[in-house]
Image (cartoon, coloured by chain):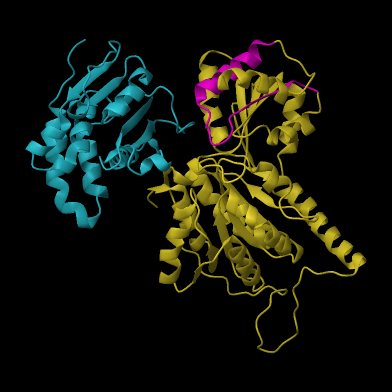
Amino acid sequence: MAKELIKGNTAVAEAALRAGLEAYFGYPITPQTELLEHLSLRMPELGRVFVQAESELGAINMVYGAACTGKRVMTSSSSPGVSLMMEGLSYIAGTELPAVFVDVVRGGPGLGNIAPAQGDYIQIVHGGGHGDYRVLVLAPASVQEAVDLTGLAFDLAEKYRSLVCIMMDGSLGQMMEPAEIPPMQPLKTEIPDWAVRGTDGGEKRFLTSINLDPPDQERLNYRLMTRWQEIEANEVRYKGYYLDDAEFVVVGFGTAGRVSLSAVRATRDKGIKVGLLRPITLAPFPNAILNELAEKVEGFLVVEMNAGQMLEDVRLVVRGRKPVEFFGRMGGVVPFPDEVLTEIERLTAGPLTTEGHPRDRWLARMAEVLG
Amino acid sequence: MQQEVIIAGFGGQGVLFAGQLLAYAGMDAGKAVTWIPSYGPEMRGGTANCTVVISDEEIGSPFVMNPTAVMAMNLPSLDKYEQLVKPGGTLVVNASMVNRAVERDDITVVSLPANDIAEALGNKRAVNMVMLGALLANSDILSLEAIEDALANHLPERHQHLLPANKAALEKGAGYKAVPA
C-alpha cells in the first residue's frame, strides 16, 4: 500500500477508526485537535459515534459508559485536558474496562503552552488517577510508529482489560511524515462475556468500580496486579540503535529519542561508540535490556523533554552500577541534536561519577544556559 | 545524505505549503522526509516557518539548528536565520521584503524580488513557488521536475487548474542564479 504524507494527529485518528474504533468522545485542545477534527468528519461518515463533549470530564465519563459495552472506544487530549480526565480514568481502571486514550503532551505545568514536551511522564506512567492501578503506556517516535501502536493499543486494551495510553508530544502530533495506514478492519462482532448489552434478556451483568467490602476490593486489586505482571512479562517493547558495540548508551523516548538518534550518529561519525535505547513501552519499562546494558557499558545519558522523570526509572534499574547523567529541556523547549551531542561528548570525556544526583549536575549547567 | 530546509515568512505567504510540496517530492523520490511547522500563536498573523528534512536514512531529529538551506520570505526571517545556515549551505532571500544585503560570504546566496516576479506573472500568491524555484536551481536538494511532478500528483483536484501558473512561477524563480561571492 502506498505511503501518504500525513500529520501525526490525523494518522492516529485514521489508524484508530481502521482498527475498529466505534465511539470517540473528546474535547478540543491544541496541539491535539486535528485528531478530534479528523474523527468528527470520518466517524459520522461510517455511521459510528463521535461526540464533542462539553468538557474533558464529560468526555472521559462517556468513554467509561461506552467501554462498558465492550466496543472499541477512545478519547484524546493534551496535558491539561488529560489532568481533567484522571478521575474517570481511575473509574475505568477500577471497573477493569479496556479503553484507549491519547495524550499529546504540551509544555506545563498549568496551562503552560502548546509546544512539545514530555512533562506528563510521571503522571501517565506512575500516577494520574487515585488508587492502585497501572496504565500500559506506548510512546511512538514517528508518525508510522504512532499508526502501528494505535492498532496495538486496542488489542492490548482488550487482551488485558486495561487502559492503554498513547503518549506523544506536540511535535509528533503536528509533524507530517510518510506513513502507511493499515486497511480498514471489520468491526468486532463478539461481545465480551463481561460487557453489558442493554435489556435484551439474558443473564444480568453489572459493572462498577464501587467495592464497599475491602476484601472484595483487595481481590480486584490482586487481579489488576497479577494482570500487570503478565503485561510486564509479555509486552515490553523498545528499539535499540548501535547497541552491539556501544560503550555508552543514550536513553530517550519519543521525540527526545529521535533527536538523540541524530546526536548518536554524529558521535559515531567521530569514532565514539555510543548507542541509543529508545523505550517504546514506558510502562512496562524495558528493565531487562537496560539491566543487561548496565553490566557492559561505561555510562548512560538520559535525555528527556522534562526535568528528569524517566531518569528515575533508569536509575532504579542501573542501581548505581554505572554513572547515569541527564540532559533535558523543559516547558516546551525541544533540544537540538547539537545540544545532545555536546552532552554525549561531556559524558564520554569524563570524569564520571556515581555520586550525587545527575539532576543536580544538570540544573547547575542549565543555570548557564538560561542565564 | 541529508538536506534540511527552513522556510520562513509571514503567515499567508505560502510558507507551510511550499514546505509540504518539498516533503511530497522527497517522499515520491523514495526518501525519508519530515515536515514540521511552527504551530504556536505566531501562526496567527506573525511569522510562520516550517522545517523540512529529506534524508536517505531514518530521520532522527525533525528540528535542526543549522539547516543546509533557508528560504527567507521577509526581513524578520532573514534576521533570524541568516546566521544559522550551515556553512556551504544555501540562502534564498525575497528581496521584495527586505531592505538590507546578506552579510554571510560562506554560503550560496540567491536574492530575488519574488513579490514583483509573482505580480508580473499575474499571480501574486505564487511568491512561494518563485522562491522555491530559486532554491531548487541553486542547491542539490531535488530537481525542479520532481517538484512539478509532486504538484501535479498532490495538488487537490479543486486546485489542479492552478498547475500551469504554479509551474510558471517555479520556472521563473529557477532562472535566478546565485551571485558568486
In the figure, what tint was chain A given?
A: yellow
Return the residue nearer the eye: A72 or A29: A29
| Chain drawn cyan in the picture | B
Point out residue A339 in the picture as x, y percentages from the top left corner. 54, 21
For residue A325, above or below residue A190: above
- Magenta-drawn stretch contains A305: no
User: Can residue A142 be seen?
Assistant: yes
Report the span colored magenta: A321-350
Return the residue nearer the eye: A19 or B73: B73
User: Can residue A181 be seen?
Assistant: no
Residue B180 as seen in the image, left or right of residue B84: left
Residue A209 position by quadrant:
bottom right
Return the residue nearer the eye: B103 or B68: B103
Residue A73 position by quadrant:
bottom right
Point out residue B147 in the picture as x, y percentages from the top left corner. 23, 38
Residue A12 as seen in the image, left or right of residue B24: right
Residue A337 as seen in the image, left or right of residue A326: left
